[in-house]
Amino acid sequence: QAQLRESGGGLVQPGGSLRLSCPASPDIFRRYAMYWYRQAPGKDRELVASLSTVGRTTYANSVKGRFTISRDNTGTTLYLQMNNLNPEDTAIYYCSSDYELAARRWGQGTQVTVSS
């Protein structure tokens, strides 16, 4: 399986929005749950959101109501829509799947910085 590659990060002001993207094959979505993780400076990597193979979603308490994990209709891209961002959301964001987790493989991630 090709390694997942994240994009869409950047610098945004508090209260702003960003949408992260992660292309993946339809086979990945059919076979594996998908995840967004993040790692802030000096902190452990944490699970932000998950999307099961049947479309069930879960979120970390810190992002509930602000972030939405989804995939496009063609099943080729994983998204993380992030609204009402705050400085505590500053981190490197990574997409992953059950396959990537089992392989202990991570992409380069995409940097999200929330600052005025």
Image: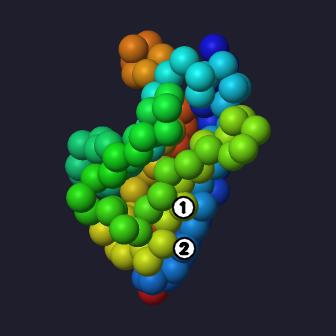
Location of residue 95 in the rendering, given as x and y in whole percent from the top left corner: 50, 39
In the rendered image, the residue lying farthest to the front is: 54
Which of these two is toward me, 41 or 15? 15
Residue at 64% over, 57% down: 8
- Callout 1, which amino acid? Gln
**Residue 22 lies in what quarter of the image?**
top right
Residue at 43% over, 82% down: 14
Vertical position of residue 93 compared to residue 11: above or below? above
**Residue 98 lies in what quarter of the image?**
top left
Q: Are marks 2 and 1 in contact (CB under 8 Å)?
A: yes
Nearer the camera: disc 2 or disc 1: 1
How many numbered marks have been drawn onto this rendered protein structure? 2
Q: Quadrant of the N terminus?
A: top right
- Callout 2, which amino acid? Ser
Residue denoted by label 2: 17
Location of residue 46 in the rendering, given as x and y in whole percent from the top left corner: 29, 44
Can residue 45 be seen by looking at this rendering? Answer: yes
Residue denoted by label 1: 81
The crowding category of the residue bearing disc 2, from other C-alpha atoms within 10 Å (few below 14, some 14 to 19, many at least 20), is: some
